[in-house]
């Protein structure tokens, strides 16, 4: 699966709109994630504020990396290895992806539409597929 140039542009421009509210977006993400799957909460050993900063920094790196997917792959593989060490399983990608989509929908408000949603869905799948193929067993 791949993403189109248009999807990449949509993801990058929409993330640029979320970045200024990154702390709020991270709060929305983790609140939503733990509502979707409360069993994930014990995986987070650091403060949610600290975790949120890491989340937003990682998203920024991944979104920027869409310009060169070949260079992004080893970054995602390293991220996957670290997450295996934290106890993350392949099944955990679904609630994480859904929480991210919800966060973007809330954060972007009227800018969120079906085309933008699909661009993010496809991007999340590309990222998750690379990570799962490297380190996770389904």
Image: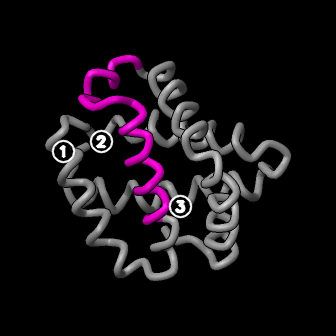
Mark 3 and mark 1: span between their CA atoms?
21 Å
Q: Which residue is mark 3?
A: 123
User: Who's the residue at 48% across and 68% down the image?
Assistant: 1
Where residue 56 sits in the image (x, y, percent)? 47, 50
User: Who's the residue at 58% across and 31% down the image?
Assistant: 28
Mark 2 and mark 3: span between their CA atoms?
17 Å
Residue 129, picture quadrant: bottom left
Where disc 3 sits, the SS reads helix
Magenta stretch mostly in which secondary structure? Answer: helix
Say whether disc 3 or disc 1 marks the residue closer to the N-terminus.
1
Residue 84: image tag: 1
Mark 1 and mark 2: span between their CA atoms?
9 Å
Residue 90: image tag: 2
> Toward the viewer: 39 or 23?
23
Q: Taking 87 as reference, is 115 above or below it?
A: below
Protein image colouring: one colour
Quadrant occupied by the C terminus: top left
Where disc 1 sits, the SS reads helix
User: Who's the residue at 42% across and 60% down the image?
Assistant: 127
Where residue 48 sits in the image (x, y, percent)? 39, 30
User: Who's the residue at 49% across and 23% down the image?
Assistant: 36
Q: Taking 28 as reference, is 3 above or below it?
A: below
Left/right of residue 98 with respect to residue 57 in the rendered view: right
Residue furthest out toward the right: 110
The segment highlighted magenta reads 38-62
């Amino acid at each position: 699966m791949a993403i189109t140039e248009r999807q990449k542009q949509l993801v990058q421009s929409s993330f640029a709109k979320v970045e200024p509210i990154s702390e709020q977006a991270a709060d929305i993400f983790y609140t939503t994630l733990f509502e979707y799957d409360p069993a994930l909460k014990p995986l987070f050993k650091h403060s949610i504020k600290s975790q949120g900063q890491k989340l937003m920094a990682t998203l920024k790196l991944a979104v920027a990396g869409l310009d060169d997917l070949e260079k992004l792959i080893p970054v995602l593989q390293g991220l996957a290895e670290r997450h295996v060490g934290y106890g993350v399983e392949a099944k955990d990608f679904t609630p994480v992806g859904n929480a991210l989509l919800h966060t973007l929908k809330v954060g972007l408000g009227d800018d969120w539409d079906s085309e933008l949603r699909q661009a993010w869905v496809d991007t999340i799948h590309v990222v998750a597929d690379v990570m799962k193929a490297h380190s996770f067993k389904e």
